[in-house]
Every structure is written in C-alpha cells, then in structure tokens.
Amino acid sequence: MNFDPDNHDTQPIVTGRRWRLITPVTTAVMAFLALVGWLASGIIFNTEKVEAAKPIKSSSELNRAFKVVVREISAQNFANTIILQARSEADKLVTVASETGGTISQLPVEKGAFVQKGQIICRIDVGAREASLAQARAQRDARKIEFTAAKKLLKQGHTSKSQMAAAQAGYDAAVANVKAALVELERTKIRAPFDGILDRQPVKIGHYMSPGQPCGTVIDKDPLLIVGYIAENQVNRISVGDSGSAKLSTGELAQGRIRYIAESPNLTTRTFRVELEVANKDLALRDGMTAELTINAGEVVATRVPQSVLTLADDGRLSVRVVDNGRVALRPVQIISDDQTGAVVTGLAASEMVIVRGGEYTRDGRDVEFEMEQMAGAAAPFDGGR
C-alpha cells in the first residue's frame, strides 16, 4: 500500500510488516475502556475495610441519669431581721403662718432656739386694732344699759316684748364685736404651737406679713422617727411594737420600736411606710439624715444556702434546685438575709438535698444520680442517687 504524505486523514502505523489505519473513533473507544478498567481495578483489589456510619444516639441514651453533687442542709432558727434604707424625720414639723396682715414689729426668738408652747415667735404691729377694741367695748357697755332698761320697762308694762328682744339682740351683737376685736388683736402675736426648736424664720423686722405668709418653722425632734419603706412581700413579717435600730449616716446609733405601718402602699413603688420611734431627749439626733433601719421581728425557721444555688424558675420566682426521690425539684424560696457566707431563705423543708454542682445542666423533674459533696478533710462516698 502506498503512503500519500499529503493525505492527513489517516496515519500509517507499522505493525509487524503490515500497515493498519486507526481512526479517532477507535482512539476514543480505547480510552473509555481503559478508564473503566482503572475504576474497576480499585473496587476489586481494594482491601481496606469501609466502616459504617455511627447511628445517632437513641433517646434512651439522651435521657440517662445525670450526675450532680448535693449537700444535705437542715433548717434552723435565724433572727428575723429586715434591713431598710431610711431617713430620720421629726415627729412634728409645722410652718407657723400669720392669720392677719401687718408689719413685723418684733422677733422675740432667734432661729435655732428652743421655744415652749404658746411662746411668741413673731409680733405684728397692732396698728388700729386697740382702738377698734376700745370702740367695741364702749358700744357693748351702751347696749348693756339699753338692754337693762328694756327689761325693767317690760316688767312695768311700759314696753313690748319685741322692743325688749331688739335691745337684747343689740347687746349680744356688741359683746360679739368685742370678742372679734380681741381675737384680731391676739392674732398680732404669732405663737409656737408646741415645744420645739424654731428651725426657720424667713421674715425680718419691718417685713410686711400677709395672711397665710409663714413666720417660722417649729420642729419637735423628741421623739424622732426613722422612716423606711418595706416591700409588699415583706410587710407581713413585721408588726407594730417590734424592736428596731437605726444607724445614721453620722455614725450615731438609736434604738426604738415600730409605732406605725401603713395600711396602703405607695402606688408608684408598691412599698409601705414604716416608722420607728426613738427617744431623743437631748435633741442630738437630727432631722432628715440618711439611716439604715434594722427591724428585729423575732425568729424564723430558715435555711442557709450558698449564693450560687439560687436560680430563677420559669415563672420568674427565686428558687433552689434540690434532689427529691432521685429527681430534680425546684423549691420557691424567699430571702430573709444574705451576706458573703450565703443567703438565709425560707421555703425549704426541714432537711433538703440541695444541688451545689451540676444543677445548671438539669431541668425540673429530670432523673439524676447524685453524690454527696466532699467537704474539706473528709471523703464522701458515692451514694448512687436512687
């Protein structure tokens, strides 16, 4: 067979002594067969083991008991104390105002001085009030003479009962005018309403006083009140007559008893006003001081627990996780007091297995295994929990 060098459709291949022509289709087929053979060789001759996928954990494995650490805690008697932020308040504080108009003529007492009930603290110029009183008295005397004469004439039959009644009315009116003039004259003397201290005096001599304008403030600090506001969930823990103490911001200490608990709360804060009455004979304690009020309401059966075991239930109530019959239970509690060593709470049974570690990974009602907390210097064996 002759080879044409100008013909590029086929290429001569020498096999032995014979020429054969291989087309592009033949080449593609051969390549495909080679690829299939290579893939087949990997499956047939592969000796590595193929591991099956691990199954998802069954629900029984997921619900298996969880291990927690518990501490057996017993209830005991604690002092039922309530601490409130408070302030001192005078038992009486009155702003004394003028009941008439006029110019201040005298200030007999300096502000800050002690005054007794009825003592004059401001004097207003009497002006024409004394003259008005004298006129009223003269008219009263004249009407008295007329009334006396009318009574005699009535007995003699020389006058009528109506004339005698008019004379009596005139006399009674004159007597009333005298009393009114005396009251108006007395109003020029502004007096202290009770024993106390003249705390403020906003007027000076020569100052014109209008009716209702304050002349001074009288304050009575004996007894002194320590006023605080207690939350509605604590108000039933205290009673009138309970003892208490107050530490003022100045460092002074005072003892007393609760004399008043409000029946209705402040509508904004939902707290109830509480007043502790303390003696202040020497008037050393001041009004308006910040104080810490501690109320002693006897004893209460409660449990001291670590701060770390306190949690919130789904309904928002403060609770403690305990183990009850091998299951987690949430006990609603109320804090009586707390400090760095723990919190004293009510709401737990006389003895509880309180979860101290691992409780945050459990839920209410879940089965758990527990072991007793290993205290310092002692080994607690595993209990098994069931």
Image: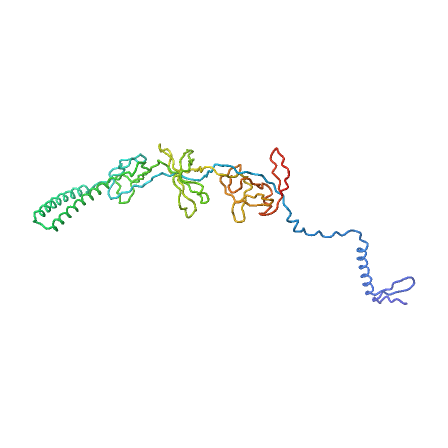
Outermost residue to the top: 282
Q: How many marks?
A: 0
Outermost residue to the right: 17
Q: Quadrant of the C terminus?
A: top right
Judge from the rendering whether residue 85 lies leftward or rightward of residue 359; answer left or right. Answer: left
What residue appears at the point 80 percent right and 57 percent down from the top-left corner? 40
Q: Quadrant of residue 272?
A: top left
Q: Position of residue 112 (x, y in %)?
A: 32, 35
What residue appears at the point 9 percent right and 50 percent down from the top-left corner? 159
Q: Quadrant of residue 8?
A: bottom right
**Colouring chosen for the image of the structure:** rainbow
Compared with 39, 368 (above or below) is above
What residue appears at the point 28 percent right and 36 percent down from the top-left corner? 117
Q: Quadrant of residue 262?
A: top left
Compared with 40, 125 (above or below) is above
Judge from the rendering whether residue 149 lies leftward or rightward of residue 39; answer left or right. Answer: left
Q: Position of residue 46 (x, y in %)?
A: 80, 53
In the image, 222 versus 200, the foreground residue is 222
Compared with 159, 80 (above or below) is above
Q: Quadrant of the N terminus?
A: bottom right
Q: Position of residue 320 (x, y in %)?
A: 55, 43
Judge from the rendering whether residue 28 lies leftward or rightward of residue 250; answer left or right. Answer: right
In the image, 189 versus 21, the foreground residue is 189
Q: Position of residue 319 (x, y in %)?
A: 53, 44
